[in-house]
Amino acid sequence: MKTSLGTHITWDVYNCNADTLSFIPTIKTVLNAIVEELQLTKVNESYKQFEPIGVTGFILLEESHVSIHTWPEHQFAAVDIFSCKPFDAKKIQELLMKSFSSDKVVIRQIERGEAISIISRDLI
């Protein structure tokens, strides 16, 4: 039984190869690989290149979104996926670690809208 409207998972990716975090082409490849791996439906995507290095990227999905913010100077990336479709966070952890040559990832998971069924019952 589904107990939330969607799952929001964040990955703090540490000790990355700074070159892999620096420019849009690599980040775009990684975000699109996530969408493909999870069989999600892309609606649109947008990226911002920071000077001299660093990227913010966002893919709007029918199922919600995938985003990334990179700090190559700190060898760090912050990745988020919010989806109403269930997915395997471990697969994404492995993909991120391989793509960014990382040896440390911290994952956090939030179930969004858990209280809706409780609130709805209270209103009836």
Image (cartoon, grey):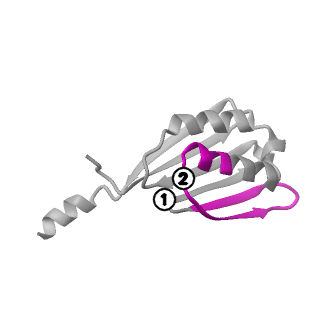
Q: Which mark is residue 63?
A: 1
Task: Tell me the SS state at disc 2.
Answer: loop
Image quadrant where residue 121 sits: bottom left
Q: Which mark is residue 32?
A: none
User: Farthest top residue?
Assistant: 103
112 horizontally vs 21: left or right: left
Residue 15 seen in the current view: no
> Relative to the observer, which residue lies in front, 13 or 96?
96
Which amino acid does the dot numbered 1 rest on?
Answer: Glu
66 horizontally vs 88: left or right: right
Read off the magenta span.
Answer: 32-60
Counting other residues with Cα less than 10 Å from the Cα at mark 2, is it few (<14), some (14-19), or many (20 or more)? some
User: Farthest right residue?
Assistant: 52
- In primary-sequence order, the first of circles 2 and 1 is 2
Counting other residues with Cα less than 10 Å from the Cα at mark 1, is it few (<14), some (14-19), or many (20 or more)? some
Q: CA distance from mark 2 to mark 1?
A: 7 Å
Image point (28%, 50%), residue name: 3
Task: Tell me the SS state at disc 1.
Answer: loop
Q: Are marks 2 and 1 in contact (CB under 8 Å)?
A: yes
| Residue 95 picture location, percent across and down | 64, 36
Image point (80%, 43%), residue name: 20
Image quadrant where residue 12 sits: top right
95 horizontally vs 108: left or right: right
Residue 96 seen in the current view: yes
Q: Which mark is residue 40?
A: 2
Q: Please state the total of marks drawn on the protein image.
A: 2
Residue 45 belongs to magenta span: yes
User: Farthest bottom residue?
Assistant: 123
Relative to 28, residue 19 above or below: above
Image point (62%, 56%), residue name: 67
